[in-house]
Image: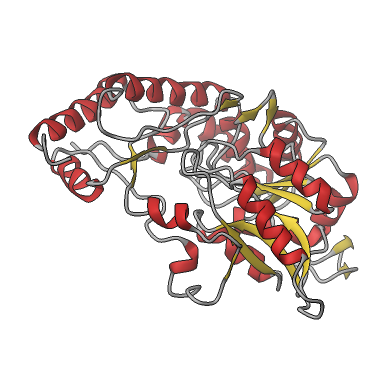
Amino acid sequence: MVIPQTDPKANYLAHKAEIEGAIAHVLDSGWYILGGEVTAFEAEFAKFIGVNHAVGTANGTDAIVIALRACDIKRGDVVLTVSHTAVATVAAIELTGATPVLVDIDPKTYTMDPSHLEDAIKAISNAPSGTNRQLKAVLPVHLYGHPADMPAIVEIARRYGLYVIEDCAQAHGAIIEGKKAGTWGHIATFSFYPTKNLGALGDGGAVGTDDPLLAEKACALREYGWHERYISDVPGMNSRLDELQAAILRIKLNYLDEENKRRGLVANIYNEFLSDSLLHLPAVRPDVTHVYHQFVVQSTQRDNLRSFLMANGIATAVHYPVPVHLQPAYKGQTTIGRGGLHNTEQICNEILSLPMYAQLSDEQTEKVCKTIVKWEKQHAGKL
């Protein structure tokens, strides 16, 4: 039997009775779009994150678009982000008409490097007038469950008068210096894709903020720009979290802290068993609570190791095999910040996501570790 790399079905089965009860309640209610379940989930999720407002959206990509537009990001504006991310981050910026400028990452945490961020800002700020580029925002990505260096990023953004929009799709519940990811910037975005730490049984997303004006804008933008039904005050879109997904998320939110702790215990087993291996294990900054959306290791023999694990019934994944700026749709079409993307490009051939989900047992985790140790012994002298 194969150990999956992630298993949203196992998470559903862990809460099956409650979820099915919630679904039945919604079906019986006859109210399926923007009703009481969405309103309740928005309040509960905002409280969990530690912000005053949450606005449900149809998916995480739309959440980024809505957050950007709420900050008045438009054609001709520049948004700084990273290339080592799901393509949704960059695609969302382009959907607003803005220009993404990609900066390099910290090779240990895989998140935006503040020094590269400031270098890119200075280069753009000092560009000749008439380039028609206006720096407007920084969009750091909290990747694999480890938050970006928000204290440094927020300070840089403050000095240059930039919005900070956090991409928290992989960091539900992660903490930096006692504050959760999603509470550091002006506005934050979340995805509830089924494999996320907090996953729906379909698509879903949310925007979170303390700013009542940004929240009001986000609410209008997700439904055609309406403040009054059928009257569009601004050009909006259709991106509503539906009642069924909201009801499911309300159930699963009750278990998120517990399941994040379980992910941490799985990570502890990996770190203990593999401490003497030749793999590069995930780094965790001392002021951070990592929620291990993924457990990402590095190996110069990544593909060989991955094949060996699969042959032994262990599935893995690569997040992400090709940086956004090297993908066919974006190659030669994106702007790269000063300093280049050396770290981003270097790691893509070495990273490997081991199995990681809350329902993964100690025995399964230990099997993964023992199989890796076996592989290393067989390749002694070659690694």
Percent position of residue 246, x then y: 64, 42
Q: Position of residue 289 (x, y in %)?
A: 57, 25
Q: Position of residue 189 (x, y in %)?
A: 67, 48
Asked where in the image residue 256 lies, by quadrant, the reply is top right
Q: Nearer the viewer, residue 286 or 145?
A: 286
Image quarter of the C terminus: top left
Q: Residue drawn at (49%, 54%), measured in percent from left and top?
A: 84
| 125 or 250: nearer the viewer | 125
Q: Residue at x 27, y 21 (%)?
A: 273
- The answer to whether 266 appears left or right of 306 in the picture is right
Q: Position of residue 340 (x, y in %)?
A: 53, 61
Image quadrant occupied by the N terminus = top left
Vertical relation: 153 (above or below) 125? above
Let me know if residue 322 appears in the view: yes
Work out whether residue 76 or residue 113 is closer to the camera in this orientation and state it.
113
Residue displayed at 71% across by 35% down: 151
Above or below, 127 against 263 in this view is: below
